[in-house]
Amino acid sequence: MLTSNVVTAALTPYDPPIWLRSAHIQTVSSSLLRKVEGVEYFRERIETPDDDFIDLDWMRASEPNIGPRRVIVVSHGLEGNSDRTYVRGMARAFARRGWDVCAWNYRGCSGEPNRRFYSYHSGATDDLEFVIRHILSEDRYDMVGLVGFSLGGNLTLKYLGERGDQVDERISFGTAFSVPCDLASSSDRMARPENYVYMKRFFRSLAEKARLKSEMYPGRIDPEVVLRMRTFREFDEYYTAPAHGFSSAVDYWKRASSSPFLEEIRKPTLLVNSYDDPFLSAECFPHDSSQANPHFHLLTPKHGGHVGFMASNAEGEYWSEKAAVQFADHVLNSGPGARQAA
């Protein structure tokens, strides 16, 4: 069993230079200014049982791996996709170390509208399960790791907690960064004036998705209404909840948040939330769950912003990428079968 102290000692602390100790610089610069070279995907489309589809973008290991055949499944954030720099950076970091990578795109996020009126949401773990089942069905891999960012981190944590002891034995660990694990309070935090610029960007994307849905399903959604929205409460009440079978935004937040499931996680799992993340409320730092569950480890760097954790090094890798790799190595070298995994 890995204790939190052991995990903390195994990871290089995040201590950025002074100019990176700004949450907004971390959040904006890491998203808009970074270039990640050397990532070449090939796409696979899988058809879902409800006559929809999910697009998977694959990257094969750039270095041969001696030992178990292994794959990382990467889940992106709200209105993201596999081409976001944080996904590409994580994919490259693991591929360099002998892992294949599957960066999956949520319904409607791969550059083409999905077929159904509903799409994706913060608690849609059935789709993550479908992707994992598909990957494992080909019997290509002995070992699976899960990495999620923001909304994708919530999916990752909720997935592992919901299934508890029933998680496939080939899933070795989970890692999540910048996770709004309490959706209600995080939604309130995002509604603050200082987050106006971020919300405007989100709603520009959501309004375009609504426009496409309105063409496919006339009369069911009005993109102009979405464009005028300023809070997730408005959007989740108008679209997310009714489209996905929730009675209200509050019902959706309660049932989709990962927080209630953290103490049920039974695979080594790391959550990294920085204290200066402008998207996260106090409820998104689940220290009690970390203390109660020896499988769940929480790191709370003072700096990092939202999906930031910028760093400068010869490999061009961010601290989050190195931390995820370090955690994976520590888990595989500390658990059952460590000698074979080393």
Image (cartoon, helix red, strand yellow):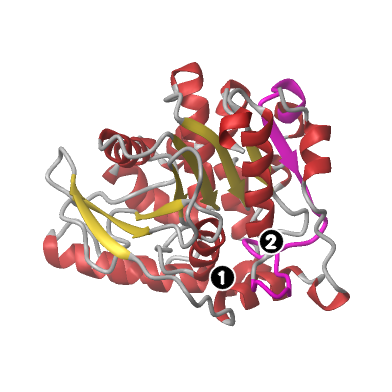
Q: Nearer the viewer, residue 14 or 59?
A: 59
**Relative to residue 89, is residue 321 drawn left or right?**
right
Q: Which of the 4 quarters of the picture holds residue 322? A: bottom right
Question: Please, is residue 30 above or below residue 248 in the view?
Answer: below
Q: Amino acid at mark 1?
A: Tyr
Q: Nearer the viewer, residue 305 or 325?
A: 325
Name the residue furthest front: 66
Q: Position of residue 339 (x, y in %)?
A: 62, 30
Is 300 contained in the magenta span? yes
What is the number of the mark on residue 198?
A: 1
What is the magenta range?
290-316
Q: Position of residue 108 (x, y in %)?
A: 28, 59
Q: Nearer the viewer, residue 281 or 25?
A: 25
SS class, disc 1 = helix
Which image quadrant: the N terminus? top right
Is the stretch drawn in magenta largely helix, strand or loop? loop
Which image quadrant: the C terminus? top right
Earlier in the chain: of badge 1 and badge 2, it is: 1
Q: Position of residue 16 (x, y in %)?
A: 82, 68
User: Residue at label 2?
Assistant: 278
**Relative to residue 7, is residue 184 drawn left or right?**
left
Examine the rendering and report whether any part of residue 180 can be seen.
Answer: no
Question: Please, is residue 80 above or below residue 46 in the view?
Answer: below
Is 34 contained in the magenta span? no
Q: Position of residue 12 (x, y in %)?
A: 80, 53
Pointer 1 and pointer 2: residues touching (CB < 8 Å)?
Answer: yes
Residue drawn where x is 42% and y is 63% of the image: 79
Tell me how many marks there are: 2
**Relative to residue 301, is residue 98 drawn left or right?**
left
Residue drawn where x is 59% and y is 71% of the image: 196
